[in-house]
Every structure is written in C-alpha cells, then in structure tokens.
Amino acid sequence: MIENQTTEKTYIGEIAGGVQITMFKQAKLISGGNDTLNDTINERQALILKIINSKHGITLPKIASQVDVSIATVKRDIDFLKEKNIIKRIGSRKSGYWQINTKTQ
C-alpha cells in the first residue's frame, strides 16, 4: 500500500519592482511491506521515482546524470512507468512537472 502525504509551501519575494510568488507542493510516498509496486518495478526505476518525488520538475538529462545511465535508458524507464500508470507528466516539456500516482491499477 502506498500512501501520499502532501506538503505545501508558498514563498513571496520582491524582484525588479514586482512580486514573485513561488508555490511548492511535495508529495511524500510511504510504502508498506508487501507492495505490488515493488514487484512491478526494478531498482533503477524505483530510484528514478525517488528522484522525481524529490523534484517534480526535473528533466530527463538530470535524472540520467543522477542515476548514471543514458538519457535513452531513463526515457525507456519513464515510458514504462507511464505505461503502468505510476507517473504522468503534467504540462509541457519545458514548464511541466512529474506527478506520481499513489493509486496504481
């Protein structure tokens, strides 16, 4: 079983004669003992999920660098995780972010 605990933070700052508002929403996954998700994905894919969970807006090249594999390998793993409905991309490639689904089918 995977549970989701969400933390929300808002920062307001003044920049160049204007105001900048930055909002963060971070989900923390908590998994139980006999989790079907752990039976579905390999260690590298689990590491990719951990990285995405720590920074939802991370890019494929940065994930590849942190996991120490090629971008093509990360793309295959991301495609697999999307196919299994474990993650999905929200928004565009440039300004979007990854969402981890806490309830998989």
Image (spheres, rainbow, N blue to C red):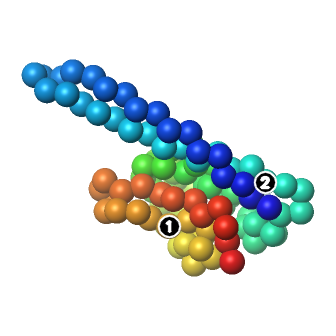
User: Could you say where residue 16 lies in the image, as x and y percent from the top left?
Assistant: 12, 23
Marks 2 and 1, the one that precedes in the sequence: 2
Q: Quadrant of residue 96?
A: bottom left
Residue picked out by circle 1: 88
Q: Quadrant of residue 40?
A: bottom right
Who's the residue at 59% across and 45% down the image?
6
Who's the residue at 50% across and 67% down the image?
88
Residue picked out by circle 2: 31
Q: Is residue 58 left or right of residue 36?
A: left
User: 74 above or below 17?
Assistant: below
For the view shown, which residue lies furthest in the left direction? 17
- Measure the alpha-carbon separation of dots 2 and 1: 19 Å
User: 84 above or below 5?
Assistant: below
Label ID, residue 19: none
* Quadrant of the snapshot with the C terminus: bottom right
Q: Amino acid at mark 2?
A: Ser
Mark 1 is surrounded, within 10 Å at the Cα level, by few (under 14), some (14 to 19) or many (20 or more) other residues, namely some
User: Could you say where residue 41 lies in the image, as x and y percent from the top left?
Assistant: 73, 67
Q: Quadrant of residue 84?
A: bottom right
User: Could you say where residue 23 lies in the image, as x and y percent from the top left?
Assistant: 38, 38
* Disc 1 secondary structure class: strand
Who's the residue at 89% across and 56% down the image?
33
* Disc 2 secondary structure class: strand
User: Could you say where residue 92 lies in the image, as x and y percent from the top left?
Assistant: 31, 62
Q: Amino acid at mark 1?
A: Lys
